[in-house]
Amino acid sequence: MVHDQIREILATHGRLASDVSELDNDSDLYQAGLTSLITVNLLLAIEDHFDVEFPDDLLSRRTFQSIDALADAVTGLVD
Amino acid sequence: MPPVPTAAPPTDFDQLVERVRAIGKEVVLPAASSVDADARFPTEAFDAFKAQGLLSAYVPTDFGGMGLSMTQVCRLCEILGHYCASTAMVFAMHQIQVASIVHHGTNSPFFQSYLRRIVDEQLLLASATTEIGTGGDLTQSRCSIERDGDSFTLEKKAPVISYALHSDAILATARRSPEAESNDQVLVVIETKDTELTEIAGWDTLGFRGTCSLGFVLKSSGSIDQVIPAPFTEVLDQSQHPFAHLTWSSLWLGMATSAVGTARGAVRKKIVEDPDTPPVSALRLSEIDELLFEMRSGLYSTIREYQELLDAGSAADAFSGFGFNIRVNNVKITSSELVVDIVGGALRIVGISGYKNDSKSSLARPLRDAYGAALMVNNDRIRGHNAAMQAVYRHS
């Protein structure tokens, strides 16, 4: 469920080179074309959508590495 | 990450500092004017560095290097900044490349022996990370490694490769393969002797003239072992980005400290000449020393933070945190702007003899050099990155 919503947000804000539907949940988003500047747009959209705030210690490359990683981060914040 | 060099024993390092200062005074400074005037490579300085083994300063002792820490390398850059900014910049850029191999190559037998070669042959390493057509963004490549069995070829249009023609090897970024996305990059160590360099841009600049940062089309080939195993993003986050900004800021600090020293000399002269009238320039001196204090404090605290991350053997991700990156960027932005303010302020204190090219207290070359600091990786590009991160990072 969280994964699907993240996929939708990625499709809108991720500006990836590949189609989001072709990515696996553990595909490397950076290798799919995610840039550090886009990361911030993505993060703001996720924070807005799930009504969460990412704490500073989650603001690193690993959090944005894959759909799974983003879902883990969001799930941890929603619970 | 593999163990990084830990600090050399203090007494040894103090002695080394004295040797580097002596080279600065006796070799680097006397050549600085002609390096600048002719925009030529500081050959005599690098001959002296090689004789002391300084090109392997950051290579761990296990491989025969000096095993200096990052903090100590920054200190050497700061010292050299007193004498010739171009020489210090080439020294710093070389150490950044060495650090990239030390931090990310030591698991590979090829790079283990390559590190020994750096020590034995005192190899000078240059860098080709920017590329025409990527708008100065280091995290994008157009060119790619073209693999054929165990060998590769690479062709890259590089707007700038500092001291390429004087280097033994060039560390170039490229896409991992012709199919890879533009940000799926690797760093490859190519031998300059195996590389055809066709000049496409000269280097007749206001300052930093001795870095010889011409542009080239680079055509090279080699063995696939020469590709650093880690993805370039990791090398950039963990090594090149912090190491570059901190070593560069260190040499700018050296330039600024030297200019304040020149200004202090002028103030002392005035006081001796007319002991009854406190010179206005003494207040001005105090003002630029405040800026120097600000510059040094920001730099040293961030050097400490990076050294702690390295010493803790932190995983790659620890270096990609927004907070650390904002602080490293802040050091670069503030240092590169303060160096102009400080050297310019020193010029106002010293007066016309600082403005002359041929006087003992000339500040002309350092002032011209200082203006380059904000442009090499343009501060507004760096601010743009910080600006994006500021929107989500809460405790800067």
Image (cartoon, coloured by chain):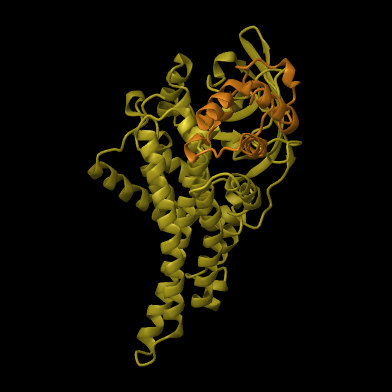
Q: Colour of chain B?
A: yellow
Q: Percent position (x, y) of residue A15?
A: 74, 31
Provide residue B113's location: percent of width, then percent of height.
43, 18
Relative placement, left or right, of B287 versus B7 is right
Of residues B195 and A56, the one nearer the viewer is A56
Along the line of sight, the residue nearer the viewer: B52 or B185: B185
Considering depth in this image, is B71 or B26 the residue closer to the camera? B71
Q: Is residue B344 left or right of residue B58?
A: right
Residue at x 48%, y 16% (from the top left corner): B110
In this rendering, the answer to whether B3 lies above or below B71 is above
Q: Quadrant of residue B232?
A: top right
Which residue lies most toward the left here?
Answer: B11
Residue B232 drawn above or below residue B80: above
Q: Does the rendering let one see residue B131?
A: yes
Give percent across and percent down for residue B178: 73, 18
Q: In which quadrant of the rendered view does residue B309 lie?
A: top left
